[in-house]
Image: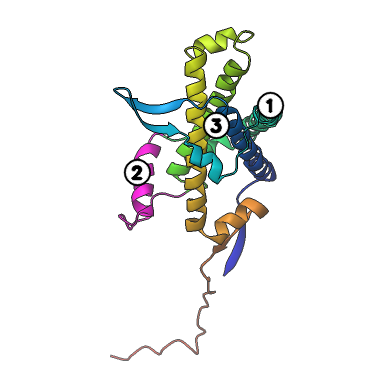
Amino acid sequence: MKTMKEKHPLAIRWFHWVNFPVLTIMTWSGLLIYWANSHYTITLFGHTFYLFFPQGFYKALHIPFRLAEGMAWHFMFMWGFSLNGLLYVLYTWVSGEWRHLLPKRNSFREAWLVVLHDFHIRKGLPPQDKYNAAQRIAYTSIIVMGFGSLVTGLAIYKPVQFYWLTWLCGGYHLARIFHFALTIGYVLFFLVHIVQVFLAGWNNFRSVISGFEVIESPNIKSLTIPSNDEQPAEEKP
């Protein structure tokens, strides 16, 4: 028998779907800004082995070389990204949803079991709740990363006005590296997240849209007590 069970509140779904296009535009506009000073490389003994990103990357994605446009989009959607993240944190705290999100004492050990299960190395399914251990760690990390992006972004945007933020980040150059590394982290998280969505199936994806998931419940048959006529006669000795 199939039954419907509420899984995600409307606010959680709203914050989730708003954050997706906002973060996508932030990443795209960040590439426009980065291309104006694309100097991050993997260099050893004076030889550059890799350039983030090579010119072929920009040409393949048809990314224009327009610094002013990139900054305008980035700074405009920065406020939406920050506000959406702030409201999300406040809602999870007030509603008590944080109890389902924050990692527990044994979450890191159970997260490893989740990884082994996803790679079909371990057959047994790890302990499951509203979010499993790996999801708890990943979703909490995203919140920390969002806060880090906001701090490093302000340190880069206004290094004089927010000089104390720039100092806490280790200077302008190091703040820019942290900001760039966090962007790579978002992209990697998004790719893993999409793979996990396909592996989890339609029911899990539907719950993020509707808020409900369909679960299979075992059929419970009513138990009847047989009448006296139906009871077997006792055998005589």
**Residue 102, visible in the rendered structure:** no
Q: Position of residue 71 (x, y in %)?
A: 66, 26
Closest to the observer: 51 or 21? 51
- The amino acid type found where label 1 is placed reads Ala
Query: Considering only vertical position in the picture, is 41 above or below 2?
Result: above
Q: Which mark is residue 143?
A: 3
Closest to the observer: 233 or 29? 29
Q: Is 118 included in the stretch rendered in magenta?
A: yes
Q: Please report the residue visible at 57 percent of the width from the left and 33 percent of the height from the top.
A: 31
Q: Please report the residue visible at 47 percent of the width from the left and 57 percent of the height from the top.
A: 199
Highlighted range, magenta: 105-128
Q: Which mark is residue 112?
A: 2
Which element carries disc 1, helix, strand or loop? helix
Q: Please report the residue visible at 52 percent of the width from the left and 84 percent of the height from the top.
A: 227
> Reading the chain from its start, which is encountered first: label 2 or label 1?
1
- The amino acid type found where label 2 is placed reads Trp
How far apart are the alpha carbons under marks 2 and 3?
21 Å
How far apart are the alpha carbons under marks 2 and 1?
44 Å
Closest to the observer: 195 or 124? 195
Q: Quadrant of the N terminus?
A: bottom right
Q: Nearer the viewer, mark 2 or mark 1?
A: 1
Mark 3 and mark 1 in contact (Cβ < 8 Å)?
no
Q: Which residue is mark 1?
A: 68
Q: Quadrant of the C terminus?
A: bottom left
| Quadrant housing residue 23 | top right
Q: Please report the residue visible at 49 percent of the width from the left and 33 percent of the height from the top.
A: 141
How many callouts does the rendering have? 3
Q: Is 98 included in the stretch rendered in magenta?
A: no
- The amino acid type found where label 3 is placed reads Ile
Taking the image as shown, residue 11 lies to the left or right of residue 163, namely: right
